[in-house]
Amino acid sequence: MDPNQKLRDVIVYNELGGILGYENISNNEVDLAAYSRTRPGWPGTAPDFIAWPESVEQVAEVLRFANTKNIPIIPYCGGEGGAGMTWPLFGGIILDIKRLNKVLEINERNCTVVTQTGIMSQELEWELNAKGLTTAHLPQSQYISGVGGFLAARSTGALSTKYGKFPDMVLGMQVALPNGRIMRTRAVPRMAAGPDLNQLFCGSEGTLGVITEATLVVRPQPEVIRSWAVMMPNLHAGIEAVRKMLRLGLRPCVARLSDEIETDKLWKQERKGAQLILAFDGFAEMVDLELRKALEIVQAEGGEDLGSEVGEAWWTRRYTGVYPNEKPGYFNDRARGLAYGGVIDTAGDFDYLEAIHNKMKESVSRIDGTIFMAHFSHWYPTGGMMYPYIYNRNIPEDPTQIPELFYKLQRAAIQAVLKLGGTINHHHGIGFMLGQYMKGEYGWDGMDVLQSIKSALDPNNIMNPGKLGLEWRES
Ligand SMILES: Cc1cc2nc3c(=O)[nH]c(=O)nc-3n(C[C@H](O)[C@H](O)[C@H](O)COP(=O)(O)OP(=O)(O)OC[C@H]3O[C@@H](n4cnc5c(N)ncnc54)[C@H](O)[C@@H]3O)c2cc1C
C-alpha cells in the first residue's frame, strides 16, 4: 500500500475515533467485508471505515470532518436499498445510523411519533402496537430496513393503496447537512411556507445529508383486516376492476393483481386468468360493506370469487418468502435461471399501465431465454405500480459477462417504460444501477435543477457519490 495512503488512513481513523470513540468505528477486515458490496461477476466495492454514531451531533461532526477532507460518506440504515444504493463506489466512510434508534415521543392525541431514523421498522411497529397504534407502513423488508432508508428511498408498504407511501407519512425531520450544520423542519400537518423541504430529502438516497430524526403520522390499529381473492379473466379486466373501485371511493388496503403468467407460475392456480388479492381494514361492518361493493365490481368485470383462503394465507405469510432467505444467490442462480437481480418497478396512469406491461414484456422477450411476469400492488385513483420479474435462463459461463446481460435486460425494460411516459422507479430507488436513466426521467433541464441543489448543499460531493445519476468525481 502507498505509505501516504496508510498515513492518511491513520489520521482519518484517529479523527473519527476522537469524534465517536474508538469503540464506535472500525476498519478491521471483517467489518469492512460485512459492509462491502458486490454481486457475482461484478467488481467489488469496499468502504475504508465504518462509523456508528450515537447522536445527531456526532453525525454532524463526522460530516464536517469528511467535508474538509473530501472523504465520501455513505449513509446506511438497514442496507437493503436496491440498485446499489449503499455500494461504497469510491470507498470512504459507511455511516451506519442503526444506533440512532430511539423512539423519542409517541403523542397519542396528535397521532404522531417522533423517532430517530436508525430504528428498524418492525421495532418501531412493536413500540407503537403496544399502544394500539401503527404507522401502517408494512413493506416486505419490515425486519431489515429502517426509517432513514424508507425516507431516503421513498419506500412503499403493502398497505399503501389506503395509507400512502412513506414520504406521505412524514410531518417533520431533522437533517445533518454535509457542512456539519443541523436543520429542522416544523412538524405541522401542512404548511405553505415555501417548498416542502421534507420532500426534498425524501428520495435523496443519502446524496444531500443525513436524516437523523423524523416525526411521522401514526393511526390506531384497525379492528379487522379481511383478505379475499378473485380470479379475473385477464390482466385488462383486473386493472379495470381496481380502477373502478378507486374511482368510486373504495379504498382496499391491499389490491395485488398478478398477470396471467405470475398467476400460473407463482400461484400455481388451476384456473387461468389474473389473480387479484384484495384486503380491506377498519371497522368490521364497514369492511364487510366495502368488500361486498368491491365484489360487485369484480363480478361485473367477469371475475370469479375464490373466497378468503388464498388472500388470508398470503397476508399471514407475506414475510416468510424472504425470511429466512434460504434461496441461493438472487442474481446468479443457475438452477432457477435467474439473471436479472435489479428491481425496476414502475408506475403510470391507467391509460398507460397495461400498455407498459405489454411493451416491456415484448421488449425483454426479444432477448433469448427471457421469461417476464409482473404484479401490480400499489394503486392510486389515477394509476398504479407494476413490479416486473425478469428472468433469463442463459446465464453466461463467464461471470464477468453477467453485468452485460443485466444491463441489456434493464435497458430493454426501461426504454419501454420511458417511451410510454412511465417512471423509471416507483419505490426501490435509483442507486447507481439506474443512474443513467435519470436524464430520461427528468430531461436535461430537470437534471440541472437536481444537480444545482446537490452542488449547493454538497459542493465537495462527499455524500454518497455516484448515485442518482448525479455528476461525480473521484476524490
Ligand atoms: C427482501 C426485500 C424486500 C423489500 N421489500 C420492499 C417493499 O415492500 N417496499 C419497499 O419500498 N422496499 C422494499 N425493499 C427495499 C428496501 O427495503 C427499501 O429500499 C428501503 O427503503 C431501504 O431501507 P434501508 O433501511 O434498508 O436503507 P439503506 O439501504 O440503508 O439505504 C437506502 C438509501 O438511503 C440512504 N439513507 C439511509 N439512511 C439515511 C438517512 N438517515 N439519511 C439520508 N440517507 C439515508 C442510503 O445512503 C441509501 O442511498 C425490499 C428489500 C428487500 C431486500
Image (tube, rainbow, N blue to C red):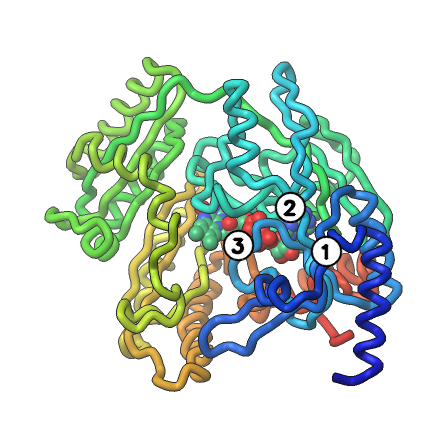
Q: Amino acid at mark 3?
A: Glu
* Quarter of the figure with residue 420: bottom left
Relative to residue 11, is residue 112 depicted above or below?
Answer: above
Image position, residue 317 (x, y; %): 32, 40
* Quarter of the figure with residue 192: top right
Quadrant for the N terminus in the image: bottom right
Relative to residue 210, is residue 396 depicted above or below?
Answer: below
Q: Which residue is mark 2?
A: 98
Asked which secondary structure carries label 3, the reply is: loop
Which mark lies nearer to you, 2 or 3? 2
Give the residue at x 52% y 21%. Answer: 130
Question: For mark 1, does the 10 Å Cα neighbourhood hold few (<14), some (14 to 19), or many (20 or more) residues?
Answer: many
Label placed on residue 80: 3
Image position, residue 163 (x, y; %): 49, 32
Q: Amino acid at mark 2?
A: Lys
Image position, residue 181 (x, y; %): 86, 48
Q: Which residue is mark 1?
A: 51
Quadrant for the C terminus in the image: bottom right
CA separation in Å, label 3 and label 1:
18 Å
Residue 104 shown left or right of residue 363 in the figure: right
Residue that lies at the very extreme toward the right in this rendered image: 68
Dot 2 or dot 3: first in sequence order is 3
Q: Amino acid at mark 1?
A: Ala
CA separation in Å, label 2 and label 3:
13 Å
Question: For mark 2, does the 10 Å Cα neighbourhood hold few (<14), some (14 to 19), or many (20 or more) residues?
Answer: many
Asked which secondary structure carries label 1, the reply is: strand
Relative to residue 321, is residue 413 depicted above or below?
Answer: below
Give the residue at x 39% y 47%. Answer: 350
